[in-house]
Amino acid sequence: MTVELRFHLPRSSGFVLDMNLSLPGDGTTALFGRSGCGKTTLLRCLAGLEPVDDGFLQVNGERWQEGRRGRPTYRRGVGYVFQEASLFPHLTVDGNLNFGYRRTPESERRIHFDDAVDWLGLESLLDRYPAQLSGGQRQRVAVARAVLTSPKLLLMDEPLASLDVVSKASILPYLEQLASRLSIPMIYVSHAIEEVAQLADHMVVMEDGRCIADGPLQETLTRVDLPLAHAENAVALLKGRVVGYDAHYHLATLEVGSARLQVPSATAPQKNWFRVRVAARDVMLSKTRPQDISALNAVEATVTEISAEAHPAFSIVRLLLDDQPLLSRVTRSAVYQLQLQPGDSVYCLFKSVSLV
């Protein structure tokens, strides 16, 4: 998927969106950045809802924009999910879902009604009206409605922003499953790094209408030349294979390269792969393997970079666990006491309860 766009907002604002990207043709790409950096404007340009001064947009071989000439929105095959569900209040869930589904010609339907209902867990809600649904349920219906148009590109503009913590937690697994089911590109806008870490495969970091970084999620989250690695909630993402489950202690064993991690799991994982977030503030470092401590996870990794933090007392250490990056926020004093240098082999310690 290739995106080259230049877009001017009215002169009164002076805002310019200037993007040149090549994004994956499937999976989920997260757009991340401060409010006002242009994330929603970019989505609207992709959907054909904003005129573009000059641009080139090609989605999996189909050219949607060239120069000023662009394919109209209704011919782009875009599914769009907004912050608010915006369901038709006079229609049941079934009616809302069929509104888009029946307007998609049968020859163009690649996603079937029953599949979308199953993926988003809506079987028991079909006869209800929007007023009878929770916020999370309404957003699941909105996502299913967008999917049932069999889009070639699915855009999600902070779909969980209006939900409380419990509702967000309930809908995220459905979105995660959806991403694995669809073979189309999804572009997901969010301010919440936790959502991005759980859902995305690729990441675009935006600032003042421009892309300042993009790449695979694991790498981009841990780049010490970007603000993300220095934020208070800085995280790394580890991906691994489930190789065991202790039903007594409710711990899943995750194989990450040559290391094994103990990860809390109330029930046996239903999938053979797992991704966990590891917060930089939760990772301790040791030059020797620790003994008799409560932290179940002590994995060997290699220091690759040490970077100063904004606070003069701290440093951020980037490490590699085999080929997967980790971050550790430690004091400058600890760096000195351990005599840490790039290339050093150290043990990373983190408690299982800190993994999500």
Image (tube, rainbow, N blue to C red):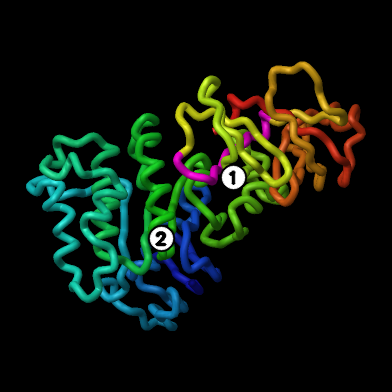
Q: Is residue 295 visible?
A: yes
Q: Nearer the viewer, residue 225 or 6?
A: 225
The circle drawn on residue 241 is 1
Q: Is residue 256 left or right of residue 313?
A: left
Looking at the rendered structure, the secondary structure element under dot 2 is: helix
Q: Within the image, what quadrant is residue 62 found in?
A: bottom left
Rendered position, 350 above or below 1 = above
The circle drawn on residue 312 is none
Q: Within the image, what quadrant is residue 156 found in?
A: bottom left
* Identity of the residue drawn at 62% across and 50% down: 218
* Identity of the residue drawn at 31% across and 59% down: 80
- Neighbours of disc 2 within 10 Å: few (<14), some (14-19), many (20+): some
Quadrant for the C terminus, please.
Answer: top right
User: Is residue 303 covered in magenta?
Assistant: no
Residue holding disc 2: 41
x and y percentages locating residue 277 in the rendered image: 58, 38
- Please name the amino acid that badge 1 sits on: Arg
> Disc 1 and disc 2: Cα gap in Å?
38 Å
- Please name the amino acid that badge 2 sits on: Thr
Magenta stretch, residue numbers: 270-282
